[in-house]
Image (cartoon, helix red, strand yellow):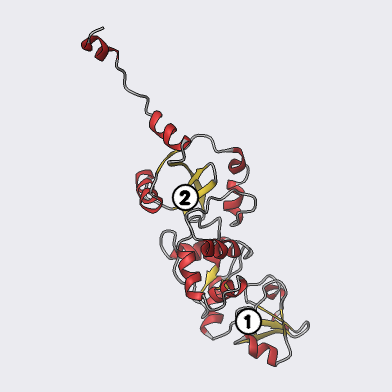
Amino acid sequence: MNQPELAALREKAPDTLLPGVLTATGLADQYVVRSSPVGEIYVAFNDHGVSAIDVADDAPAFEAWFTDRFGRMAFPGGSLPAPIARRLDRSIAEGRPGSLPLDLRSVTPFQARVLLKTAEIPRGEVRPYGWVAAEIGKPSATRAVGSALARNPVPVVIPCHRVVRSDGVLGRYSMGEDANKQRLLEAEGLDVGGFSALAARGIRLIGSDTTHVFCHPTCRDARRITDRHRVEFRSASDATRHGYRPCKHCRPAVAA
């Protein structure tokens, strides 16, 4: 068979060949689109779990961001692996990973500790950066905690939107615009306006004069305190000086 005859047998490779080979060999991820309180979000995944979540104007923009961030390509996915499919939508709705497999290979061990501690903050509540630092045994690493959260590859599922500045200001947000942080918190039922008003007055903690326990203002226990029994404090030392003890749920004295 001569060369022209061989050339006539040549056929174009199917469009699915390259994505299939790259994803099968771990050189690329797949992604799907899901709804969230901040609009559509792109969710990338691989055999290790969910690797990235972000907002984007369109699929090409997400693909470009993903390649720039992770150094590999991302292609539109078909069916989700069973462990991810069973949990993904619930994790997005609840704002916590639960049993959702995550691929955190893109972060350092310290950053992973920060992210996993942040995942423990309950829905509709916030904690200061110093609380996260103290909880992981690095009380002087508040700035490093902020940097780790800015590198969070899977926001929404690991709720970095629930970590705020020590002065009560919501602060920056890594996914899309900063306003998305407030949108997510409000979707979880947090009265952001009320919390911000307390912060503006220098109020950092709330106590109950019946239990003599003090909490972070957004703690579920603090929100049950009626106005009649509500006591405001500017610091943990202020609260303990008045004979109050820290809440065991939100552990407000940790970052003091």
Quick one: quadrant of the C terminus? bottom right
Outermost bottom residue: 241
Viewer-side residue, 95 vs 226? 95
**At which x and y percent is residue 182?**
50, 66
**At which x and y percent is residue 128?**
55, 74
Look at 60% across and 54% down and name the residue there: 97
Viewer-side residue, 123 vs 79? 79
Viewer-side residue, 76 vs 139? 139
Question: Disc 1 marks which residue?
Answer: 205
Ranked by sequence position, the earlier of labels 1 and 2 is 2
Q: Are marks 1 and 2 in contact (CB under 8 Å)?
A: no
Outermost top residue: 1
Quadrant of residue 252 in the image? Answer: bottom right
Report whether 251 appears left or right of 34: right
**Helix, strand or loop at disc 1?**
strand
Residue 41: numbered disc: 2
Outermost right residue: 210
Q: Is residue 9 above or below residue 144?
A: above
The amino acid pointed to by label 2 is Ile
Report whether 70 appears left or right of 232: left
The amino acid pointed to by label 1 is Leu
**At which x and y percent is residue 216?**
63, 77
Q: Is residue 140 above or below residue 20?
A: below
**At which x and y percent is residue 226?**
71, 78
Q: Is residue 236 above or below residue 4?
A: below
